[in-house]
Amino acid sequence: MKRRQFNQALAGAGALAALHPFGIVRAQAQKLKVGVILPRSGYLGFIGQSCQKGADLAPGVIKEMLGVDIELMNADFESNVDTARTRAERLIQEGANVLVGPFDSGAAAAIAQVAEQRGVPFVINIAAAPQITEQGYKYVFRNFQTAIDIVRNGLDLIGELFQATNTVPRTAVYMHVNDTFGQAMTKGIGAMLPRRTQLPFKIVDTISYDPAAKDLTVEVSKAKAANADFLLLVCRLNDAIILRREMVKQRWNPMGIISPGSPGMYEEQYFKTLGKLSEYAVSNVPWYNPNSRLTKVVEKAFLKQNPKDKLDFHGLNAGFTFEAILIAADAYKRARSTDPKVLAEAIRQTNITEKMTLGGPIKFNEKGQVEGIGSACVQNLNLLPTVVLPANAAKAKPVFPAPYYKKA
Amino acid sequence: MSFDLVANVVVAGVLTGLVYGLMALGLSVIFGVVRVVNFAHGEMMTIAMYAATVLFAELGLDPFLCIVPVAVAFFFFGYLLQRGLINPFITRPEHSQFMLLVAVAIVMVNAMLMVFGPSARNVQVDYQLESFEIGKILVDKARLYAALAAVATAGGLFVFFKTTLVGKAIRACADNHLGALVVGLDVKKLYALTFGLGAVCVAVAGCAMVLLVDVTPPLGPAYTLLAFVIVIVGGLGSMPGALLGGVLIGVSEAMAGLFVAPSAKGMFSFGLLILILLFRPQGLLGKKP
């Protein structure tokens, strides 16, 4: 090394050392690499793509909000749990500082194991199986309701729906997807429904089915034969579409279809594929707050990136995905480091009060779970998912029974 | 459990099984004559389903009208695939044939992903959500039409093989390859014709199936496996066996869904497969080797 080069290097090192106490160089020169794992293809493909919209707008919005630079590293796990595990491994190998995703409970459980083994923070956008945050993991965080919370809020909203519409259905047939999420929800319903004495109905038959089913003829025949007043449904998207079509083919017109908290019936593709047949379905789900300031900021960015879309259809998926990245960015800003331990500790200390989704501030408990996330009763009205309950957030009155109802 | 419920489910199982049977018939015909198992069978059907969705979207053609152009295109596709790619592998070991056709299947799936993307596509025709009411039994119109198309195609194929000279020549190739060569039959051409006919079955099944199932690129492998199960149950190489196998699988899945658990439907087709392999390895209508 020549003398001039040595002097230049020394000066550079001196400047770095001088700036180090303020963490300026490290935090500003580095980007936070966020590995986003979503099911952008396969039977969860549409929902994964919907979540991706929230991820895509996050770097721009967060840069303006927090001044943090984010680099997204996108991975598609093809609706396959094993693929989710390998994608998580690869993202970590390629330098992801934090993982975000994956919409699905089975995949979330697999990614959580990888994240924990490799010591990389993992912020779950959407996945409800309670056991994910019951394992004592140090690097796993969830800003979404557990199945127990979803069921509790969902059943309470069903009671409110019946009260608001002066209806007293006596029987329900319960259909659910037979995956990690569906089983967690079923367990929750089994535990909580008997304790909800204010609910007037009892479940007369329970029918589980494959979430990747291509044909639900037998399942719907069986459900119809139960002759119940309404259909209580825990579904995904594709199966919800197949099921609704099959109901029409088999001329089964119960009082309504009510989900106590599952995706599917408020998704854009449900409306696009079914048109008017999508009307009056009810989903009691964690939802976004259309009146929050952050929602308006996100909506602006969303419409800029997706001029032909409406946030109404993507608010839940995009909202929770955006918030997961926001949590990581907020922690990175406070930690001024991408060191996984430091970043995980900063995530644990999160306290975000200005948020997009319904409920209290984003604060993690000792298990890495956010509590107090709110739900809304969302009904498909005029080809839009519309909040009908609780009354203070409602944009329309609930319609129940559905006008197509024909008493058997 | 009421009789109406069981009858409705049986009817739906039979109709679906007939379409499955037609798809498997293509596989059976190809194996029966060319002695090559087409491991890209389900993927070919998925391409046919996409072709029907494209013709429906661009020209408004009903999937049943799409059968004609798609079947013609598939005949030439099958013919050329056999002549150009598969023919050199006929005398090679079975694992080479297997690898070749699995590779073809993977290329097809990825090509479909590139062209159509991962999202599901379907067609929506007026009668798709309608049913015929026969007493207390509801018969899904689209499913019934699809089954009729399957029966008509299978019938046409039987007549072709039984009555035409080319059909008889193909059967001669299947019965005695050496004898066919000795009497001067152009075996390579007949093999290619057979592959073309197998592809026609797949094309018709795909056009009919698109009314029952939304199509995505990864759909193929599941149908390849299903076709394989059906022809083993019915008898590899037996044409009536393929249809019978399809109906049996369709009905057994439906019955299992009704009496056991809908989520365990698939298990029963494989259970049936194991029983057949144990007690009648040549399949229900297959000949003993």
Image (cartoon, coloured by chain):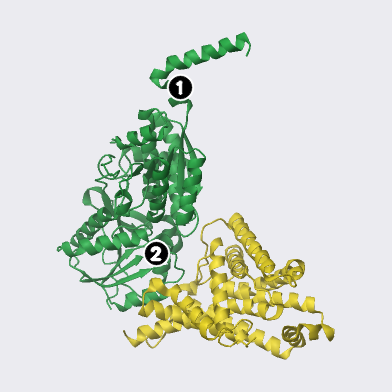
* Residue drawn at the location 45% of the way across and 31% of the way down: A69
Instruction: Label 1: state its secondary structure.
Output: helix
Label 1 crowd (10 A; few <14 / some 14-19 / many >=20): some
Identify the residue under disc 1. Answer: A25
Left or right for B46, reference A176: right
Q: Chain of mark 1?
A: A
Chain B colour as displayed: yellow
Image-quadrant location for residue A100? top left
Relative image position of residue A19 (x, y in whole percent)? 43, 17
Q: Dividing the picture into quarters, in which one does residue B206 lie?
A: bottom right
> Where does residue A35 sit, x and y in percent of width and height?
46, 42
Q: Which label belongs to residue A240?
A: 2
Nearer-the-camera pick, A113 or A337: A113
Chain rendered green: A
Q: Is residue B196 above or below residue A122?
A: below
Left or right: residue A392 compared with residue A62: left
Q: Spatial distance from mark 1 to mark 2, Cα to Cα? A: 51 Å
Q: Nearer the viewer, mark 1 or mark 2?
A: 1
- Number of marks in picture: 2
Q: Chain of mark 2?
A: A
